[in-house]
Image: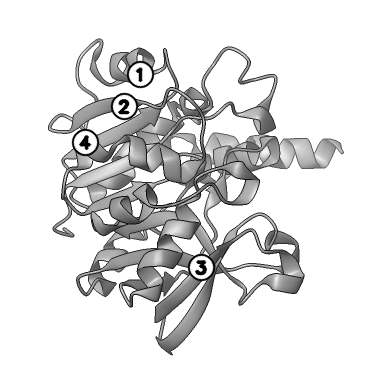
């Protein structure tokens, strides 16, 4: 257990990278194997000791999420989990989404999990974030290739010891020429409520939106942020090929599906 009992999950957004699948179905409700993305993320949070999850959603989506978690009986393993939804009326960036949940967060520390990114089986990162905390915020990092530096927020690294390091600053989607490192922010965070104060003071940044990376930069420059470099990539289910990969990886990890899925994959490969 991590001692952190709250998780915030930004699950709003148009899901344009997954069109036409997301024309009528919210991206957060797209199934991966036998359950929607929101349930996978909730289960990850519960494994880390979380007892309350706040989903940040588009208008009209909250009722779908609440219905999934409550209708027909409580889901196994999530019986004691409190589910809340907060509506982000207008898309204003990831930072704006988190700030929308300010009242629900209050002054608590919280995990923040992006619903587009899913952990691989046996590779949870939230406990490592909690273990690295020293009273400030902690961010999950991954070494990314040059082509990814225009897609990820990237940190300015400080002193490093093993997989843990000081974060001195952060830049949103800098590109190869302006990147201060190859350590990308990969969608798992442990924040103190200080991040809300930082978000509240921001002007729109990259893309004209309130960027979470810019708030991380603020707290990092105060000496209030650390990072943990993970060994495993998260699964990006916000793109079609990533959703396919996640279905295979998670399907093979499930004993009830493993043998049949392996047989299907072998059969498909043999027919090529």
What's the CA distance linking mark 3 and mark 1? Answer: 32 Å
Front residue of this view, candidates 103 and 13 = 103
Disc with the residue nearer the chain's start (1 vs 4): 1
Disc with the residue nearer the chain's start (2 vs 4): 2
Q: Which mark is residue 170?
A: 3
Q: Secondary structure at mark 2?
A: strand
Q: Secondary structure at mark 1?
A: helix
Asked if marks 1 and 2 touch (Cβ < 8 Å), the reply is yes
Front residue of this view, candidates 267 and 188 = 188
What's the CA distance linking mark 1 and mark 2? Answer: 7 Å
Q: Which mark is residue 62?
A: 1
Q: Is residue 91 visible?
A: yes
Task: Please state the horizontal and vertical placement of residue 251, each as a whole percent of the image.
Answer: 51, 39
Q: Quadrant of the C terminus?
A: top right
What's the CA distance linking mark 3 and mark 4? Answer: 26 Å
Task: Please state the horizontal and vertical placement of residue 206, each as a whole percent of the image.
Answer: 62, 51
7 on left or right of 108 = right
Task: Please state the horizontal and vertical placement of residue 59, each as a whole percent of the image.
Answer: 43, 16
Asked if marks 3 and 4 touch (Cβ < 8 Å), the reply is no
Q: Quadrant of the N terminus?
A: bottom left
Residue 246 vs 23, above or below: the answer is below
Identify the residue shown where x is 68% and y is 35%. Answer: 240
Q: Is residue 41 visible?
A: no
């Amino acid at each position: 257990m991590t001692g952190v009992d709250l998780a915030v999950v930004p699950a709003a957004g148009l899901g344009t990278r997954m069109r036409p699948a997301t024309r009528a179905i919210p991206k957060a409700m797209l199934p991966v194997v036998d359950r929607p993305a929101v349930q996978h993320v909730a289960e990850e949070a519960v494994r880390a000791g979380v007892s309350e999850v706040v989903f940040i959603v588009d208008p009209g989506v909250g009722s779908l999420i609440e219905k999934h978690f409550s209708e027909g009986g409580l889901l196994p393993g999530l019986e004691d989990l409190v589910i809340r939804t907060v509506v982000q009326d207008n898309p204003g960036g990831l930072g704006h989404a988190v700030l929308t949940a300010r009242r629900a967060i209050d002054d608590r520390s919280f995990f923040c999990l992006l619903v587009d990114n899913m952990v691989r089986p046996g590779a949870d990162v939230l406990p490592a974030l909690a273990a690295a905390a020293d009273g400030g915020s902690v961010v999950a990092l991954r070494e990314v290739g040059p082509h990814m530096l225009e897609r990820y927020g990237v940190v300015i690294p400080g002193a490093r010891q093993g997989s843990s390091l000081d974060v001195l600053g952060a830049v949103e989607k800098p590109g190869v020429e302006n990147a201060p490192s190859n350590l990308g922010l990969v969608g798992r965070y442990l924040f103190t409520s200080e991040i809300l104060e930082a978000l509240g003071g921001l002007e729109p940044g990259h893309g004209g939106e309130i960027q979470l990376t810019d708030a991380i930069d603020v707290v990092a420059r105060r000496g209030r942020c650390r990072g943990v470099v993970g060994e495993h990539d998260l699964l990006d289910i916000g793109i079609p090929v990533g959703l396919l990969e996640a279905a295979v990886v998670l399907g093979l990890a499930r004993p009830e599906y493993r043998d049949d899925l392996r047989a299907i994959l072998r059969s498909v490969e043999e027919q090529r």
